Image: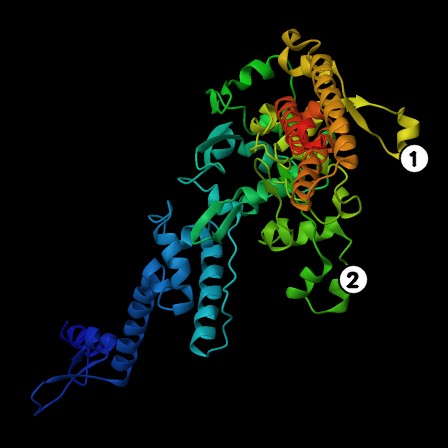
Amino acid sequence: MNEEHESRAADNVTDGRPRWWRILGLQRRDRRWWPIGLTLWGWVCVVSLVIVVGGVGFGEYSMQPDFCRSCHIMEPYYQAWHSSTHRNVPCQDCHFEPGWRNTLKGKYQASAQVAKYVTRTYGTKPHAEIHDASCLRMGCHEQRLLEGKEVWMVTATDGEPLELAFDHKPHLGKLRRGKQLRCVSCHSQIVQGEHLTVTTDTCFICHFKGLQHGRDNEVLAGCRSCHDAPKQEIEMELGLFDHEDYITRGVACENCHSDSIRGDGDVPQQVCGSCHNKEEHLERYQETEFLHHHHMTEHKVECTQCHIQIVHQLGAASEAQPGSCATCHGGTHGGPAALYYGFGGRGVPKMPSPMSRAEVDCIACHRHAQLPAPVALVVGQTFTAVSDSCVYCHGTKYEGSLEEWREKVALSQTQSDEVCTQAALAIMDADLSREARVRAEILLADADHNIRLVKLGHGVHNVNYATALLNAATEFCREAEGLLPSVRELQPE
């Protein structure tokens, strides 16, 4: 019995140390102020414990957003996140895909970024991707595709809020123009100082690029699939305007707003050179299917990084653009435009037509094709205005108005022509002083300018302005006649 007890004691004590001391690497230190010390194994255990605890602690700290901003190049991204609606979402919830393997992968990539920062081999624009799985993970937006249409509030060009209808499911669940979109195809990761923000520029590229605009306007999914006409009455100079009255009659949006799109969203080939410098990469410029799949579906490249901006707002295309008709046909429609917008005459203040003040486009009235389609394919088509155009928008109350306006302008023009022709003949043969003749010629020139503007610009484009111009022309000519010597002055004494 004593032998067995001694054997156990021998197993538990070596050099006077209990077994658990040996496991922890502890030893006695005689004649020392601190009687307990560490063996080599003890130091190994302590260092290992520090590394493990420190690593876990640092790993946890490195998952905090404040750690990300420790690199100064991340400060703009941190501030954008901090002021966004995602400010309560840790960075890794978005930037790491769900699952522990993806977390480890993300930590490795983040560590590589830290190493680049320490060694000063980093780029000034960090590249990060967010995958759909992160957005649609449990507790975030996992139900987003099932919620159907929702209202998206944007700011219109006049500063007023505008409601847009949007449905995530067809954009992410189906191919759009043969392309598979991702969440970040529309939600840019950082743009204009904001984080994960949708800009309408991306929408315009997809909905408008490569489609016809103007008279033959084409919009992917149509105008009213995104936004309806204003519900409230619009206060204009001529009174209140209610879109609903026109929509119920089937008046198309482009009838008044055909100039609401500017730009074609093209991709200049030199854009590719900003990222690629290998010839074999640049040679694939025309392979649009491959380019979209590689840049947009597989990786995060915003549309606006390659595509030229398309502008969509009221009056967006009002200015002459390169490649437009005005490039070759300069001033072809200058007269009609001047009358329509109510300027260019002499002696009459600016007087825009009611249609101009309502921002109605030319195609609203010019709807009748003059030439058959086979002929127009060769020589081009010209569209004229007919009474049906008035009825199309305003109903039967305007039936016959176009003919009445034309007759009114024609009558005023005939009367002005007669007065001014008579005055010009009289002054031509009159014996006038130099000052009187100069004054008379100026008055006749102003009258002639107004008459030609109405005649060549087709006064029916702005009946009120055309009538005012012709009345002013008549007054100019009568004032010129007033400079003629009276009968008494011509009689000899």
Residue 174: percent from left, percent from top: 64, 35
Q: Residue 424: where, in percent of width, then height?
A: 76, 32
Mark 2: give few (<14), some (14-19) or many (20+) Cα within 10 Å. Answer: few
Q: Quadrant of residue 438?
A: top right
Asked whether 310 or 92 is in front, the reply is 310
Q: Which residue is mark 2?
A: 283
**Residue at horizontal 15 percent and vertical 83 percent from the top:** 16
Name the amino acid, label 2.
Glu
Say which residue appears at 36% left-offset and 64% top-offset: 69
Q: Specify the quadrant that holds the C terminus.
A: top right
Q: Residue reaching furthest bottom?
A: 31
Image quarter in which the N terminus is found: bottom left
- Looking at the image, which is closer to me, 463 or 111? 463
Along the line of sight, the residue nearer the viewer: 430 or 388: 430
Check if mark 2's residue and mark 1's residue have beta carbons within 8 Å: no
Residue at x 27%, y 85% (from the top left corner) = 40
Residue type of the residue flagged with mark 1: Val
Provide the secondary structure element on which disc 1 rests.
helix
Query: Which residue occupies the extreme top position in the image?
Result: 396
**Residue 416 horizontal/vertical position (percent):** 71, 24
State the CA–CA distance, disc 2 to disc 1: 36 Å
Secondary structure at numbered mark 2:
loop
Measured as percent of width and height from the top left, residue 253 is found at 63, 25
User: Where 180 sits versus 30, above or below?
Assistant: above
Give the labeled residue for mark 1: 378
